[in-house]
Image (cartoon, helix red, strand yellow):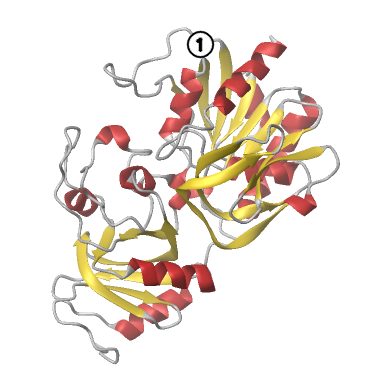
Amino acid sequence: MSTGNNIPENATACLALADGTLFFGRGFGATGDCVAELCFNTAMTGYQEIMTDPSYAGQIVTFTFPHVGNTGVTAEDDETADPVAAGMVVKWDPTASSNWRAEAELTDWLKTRGRIGVGGIDTRRLTRAIRHAGAPHAALAHDPDGNFDTDALVAKAKAFSGLEGLDLAKDVTCAQSYKWDEQRWAWPEGYTRQEAPKHKVVALDYGAKRNILRCLASAGCDVTVLPANSTAADVLAHNPDGVFLSNGPGDPAATGEYAVPMIKEILNTTELPVFGICLGHQMLALALGGKTIKMNHGHHGANHPVKDLDTGKVEITSMNHGFAVDADSLPSGVVQTHVSLFDATNCGIRMADRPVYSVQYHPEASPGPMDSMYLFERFAEAMDARA
């Protein structure tokens, strides 16, 4: 084993960056190692929703908020069946849960689901490094005995291909179509079922979060979810009143190889309302003739201010994306509707003459603020107008 970089006593986890920088801490969850892009998330709550968000495929998440684990985990808060993020990095070791909804401890939940965590890391230093140099490739290892081949871990990080050019939607999409009628959580009933839907919606699953589907159901939609590689014929066979393009991970240009032709056909042959979120926003932009670019460190958090250019209103939003739509590439007839007040990147578009629109952020508030819930109602109103 290489110990060229002295391993601190009692260290049971190692985070190795591709540039050779090493961070040591205390491991929890599963043992072993993983390799991914390293990002940071600034949300103050919702670690379970973040870890199970399919948009985090191929990424290790650094949590800037130190109190992780204090609300435990509950199956109700999973955004998909199992964690999708490769691992998690936190400043303080996860605390014991203290919440009436908790069904299990975070550390046990990660262990049974094969995800690695590390505590005791200087997350402020790590976050500053990511902001300065961009999201690095990293290897994360957990060994209770503290045996680490640091040279091998750095080599694994260097060998990681990165997210550019990767179609990760195919790895997180559903294997076959299914119906969805569960609505948003509400006290005291919890999750209820949509029993009187008004609109038939086909949702393309590029890595859809459950709470986004719940918001569609709560807006009066009868939702049918289709795999990411579905064709326009597959979509139209359900005779939908509207088409929804979900969030998801990876390089939009790669997923666009099969998704963009489908969206173009929908736009060229129908007048259906179309609504996209996150990767779905990027897919729509590509279908309309725009381009996407890789960001330095992306947007990951629940406190991102976004300005609605149509109304002048500023919304606080939840975001998770490492690629962005290049606003300068948008063609005539496509209007930029929202921009980030952090860095002026594009956060929303619409067609000038049709009910076709999308946003970069996650308006379903899981986790995060509820400022943008109106977008689901807008989608329903667009379908009402065509009825």
The residue closer to the viewer here, 217 or 263, is 217
The residue closer to the viewer here, 68 or 29, is 68
Image x and y of residue 349, in percent: 70, 39
Against 332, is 275 above or below?
A: above
Q: Please state, as top left, top right, bottom left or bottom right, where the N terminus lies in the image.
A: bottom left
Image x and y of residue 167, in percent: 56, 54
Dot 1: few (<14), some (14–19), or many (≥20) neighbours within 10 Å? some
Along the horizontal axis of the image, is 30 left or right of 324?
left
Seen at 72% across and 33% down, the residue is: 310
Seen at 19% across and 53% down, the residue is: 107
Q: Total marks drawn?
A: 1
Q: Quadrant of residue 194?
A: top left
Seen at 62% across and 51% down, the residue is: 252
Image x and y of residue 250, in percent: 54, 54
Against 302, is 342 above or below?
A: below
Against 386, is 13 above or below?
A: below
The residue closer to the viewer here, 87 or 81, is 87
The residue closer to the viewer here, 139 or 333, is 333
Along the horizontal axis of the image, is 300 left or right of 255?
left
Tag 1: amino acid: Pro
**Residue occupying the far bottom of the picture:** 4
Query: Secondary structure under badge 1?
Result: loop
Q: Is residue 237 visible?
A: no
Please give the residue where the numbered disc 1 appears in the rendered image. 197
Q: Is residue 331 visible?
A: yes
